[in-house]
Amino acid sequence: MQVDIKGTDEMVQSKLDEANELMLTEPQITSGLHSHIIAVFQENKDARENSGVNKIMLDSLRAYNGNYSSNEMAAILEEGGSTIFMNLTSHKCRIAASWIKDIELNDEVISIEPTPLPELPRDITDRISQAVEVEFQASLENSEDTTQTIKEINEFKRDMADAILEELNSEARYAFKHIETKIKDQMFEGGWKKALSDFIENFCIFPTAIMKGPIVTKSIKLTWENGVAVEKPIYSFVSKNISPLDMYPSPESESCQDGNLIEHIRLSEVELDGLKKQGAPYDSDKITKVLEQEQGKGESNLDGSIEDEKSGEELRDNQHAANKNVYHGLHFYGPIKASMLRQWGLPLGVDVEDTDILEAEAILIGSEVIMAKLNKDPLKRRPYFSASYQSRPNSFWGTSLPAAMAPVQKMCNGCARALSNNMALASGPIMEVYVDRLADDGDVEEISPRKVIQVVSDPMGAGGRALQFIDVPSNAAELLKVYEFYEARADDVTLIPKHSNMNEKAGGAAQTATGLSMLLEAASKGIKDCIRAIDYGVIIPRIEYEFYHLMLGGGIPFSGDISVIARGSQSLTNRASEALKRQEFLRVMTMPAVLELIGKEGVSNLVREMGDEMGFISNIVPSRQEIKLKEKENAERQAAAQKAEAESKLAPALAQINGQKEMHNQTMQLKGAELQSNQELELAKLQVKDQAENLRTQSNIQRDQTSLERAAMDNSAKIEMQSKEIAVSLRGEGTGDRDKIN
């Protein structure tokens, strides 16, 4: 029965009765969400079973392990004969896996680069633009050519724009190296390489392979402080390969990001205890209850139809032995109405309306929901990534490599069994014996050289033989041809030829180095397609998820946009052949006639593009503007050298001219000195004359001063005399005693 699983109330109610037997009476967040997870899981499981995906996955795993299904083995045993399994599937899978691992497990396969037009902080872009513009304007002002054409002006503008963009990219790449190093360090510490290696194995076996991560895991790291061991808790961003047999997507899903997604998780007691100690968002009380009551431990009742075969193919004995100490649970991701989440007791913000569809995450162990929360990722992404060896349009599940070559594998197995049976029959004669004509009781089944078998004569008198040996004809040659035909067909359906693993018996073009290189290049097209599926389905989104996780956690101070580059498909090239092509092309480009035609600027453009194609982070080839500046400097140096050479040739004439100039200068210096001497003499005469005139003037002044002083003294004496006379005159008239006074 098909049930609507788009988060409606009707779906939950319809599945509630089916889930009651697996539920306990718990608070509403347990019962409601528990029933929803069970309902979604049941529908996803039914869809996977009804679509035949379970059978395809188990058949692929059996083919990889070289085993027949139980029905096939029963039919073969009923017919009798050989049960040989010619495991071409495992051989092709291992070649494909090793080829892909050789490329994808390279440390340089992951690169974080700016987008073609990087968006950096405004102050950085303004500073770069201003610096480049000032430099170019200065070079333009220093240019002696004042009659530039429109073409030259436009070229100058384009060069300036290219230089600014190149500087922006250089600055962005420099900033991103720190981010790339940080992400690689965290991914590798979280077991990225081991998880990717296991993922590639599943990629080559199952219809779809799944990677999970980053799983934020708390662990204890032992460090040393002053010689003392100290335990410190750390958080790791773990990556994990998920078995496709444990993944249950919605029937309408095309990727892990669509619809409802459920993973059948298997946890040990230690892992559950670790989740309990980790705290929020895990419910410690419910985990304790699971551990105490051992809910979900042992044989799984989630999908018993595949557990037995899964355990057997994984060589883990039967389901009981394989799951003896395992706790089974369901990790759920999916959209749910806000109204239902509120009914189940999940805390939501006041700004969330009941009609909103929210992305929820929960873990169910037994009957306990040990973790329930909203997906806080801004883009509502889930930490699951998938890729298929051969994708199937509009489907989550692709076509596995074993499924692609299943018809070839069956024909090769049939030929091998027929060949084995025929060789067994044709290896020796079949003996026909008339037992009633044996003269003794000897054992005719034991045939050995010189053995004597006694028989009686033919009772019919016809002289018939009592013993006859019948040779079974060998059909080995024909069967081998049929086998080889279908074995070759395996190369076509898988796009993995024999010579890809350097088979020493490879013939034809593969016997020469050039031919083998061409065949490998042609064969690599199919592997390139597989690697691109891993790049775009797993590596790029996984790194972007890690980047945003670090950004949201404040681990990286960054502004701008990034582009995650996975160089896996680019790495799969015949490097020797490409190197020869580049060398030959450069040799042609540097020929004098070609170099004169395209110039150094043209050669630099080609070399720069080759560097970009080879993935150089920093291109050592100078820009067009730098080449022009260097050419200008070279021209100036050449002009200076030519000038020096010309001057060296004119040195004698210049020496004579310089000598004449020197003599003329000396003559002029003498004349100047004589003139200066005459001028100084005249000046001295004038100074002496001035001094004499000054002396005469001073003498006249002194004489005049003396005369004035004398006149002043005479006037003083006269005045004094007159004063005395007046005084005497006045005194005599007043006393009448003139004679006494005298």
Image (cartoon, rainbow, N blue to C red):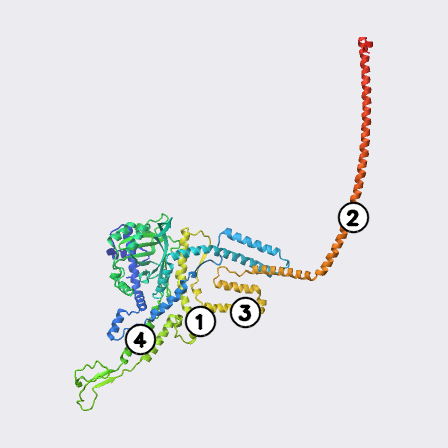
Judge by depth and name the residue closer to the eye, 359 or 526: 526
The CA span between labels 4 and 2 is 127 Å
> What is the three-letter code of the residue carrying label 1?
Ser
Residue 674 numbered mark, or none: 2
Which residue was labeled with disc 4? Answer: 416
Image quadrant containing the C terminus: top right
Q: CA distance from mark 1 to mark 4?
A: 32 Å
Location of residue 332 in the rendering, given as x and y in whole percent from the top left corner: 32, 56
- Mark 2 crowd level (few <14, some 14–19, many ≥20, 10 Å Cα): few
Q: Secondary structure at mark 1?
A: helix
Residue at 32% x, 78% y is: 479
Q: Earlier in the sequence, mark 4 or mark 3?
A: 4
Inspect this view and state whether residue 575 appears. Answer: yes
Looking at this view, name the residue that lies furthest to the top.
736
Q: Which of the marked residues, 4 or 2, is nearer the chain's N terminus?
A: 4
What amino acid type is highlighted by mark number 2?
Glu
Q: Are marks 1 and 2 in contact (CB under 8 Å)?
A: no
**Residue that label 3 marks:** 588
Kindly identify which numbered label has been placed on residue 517: 1
- Foreground disc of the pair 4, 2: 2
Specify few, some or many for label 1: CA neighbours under 10 Å numbering under 14, 14-19, or 20 or more.
Answer: some
Q: Residue furthest front?
A: 227
Neighbour class for label 4 at 10 Å: few (<14), some, many (≥20)?
A: many
Quarter of the N terminus within the rendering: bottom left
Q: Please report contact status of discs 3 and 2: CB closer than 8 Å, yes or no.
A: no
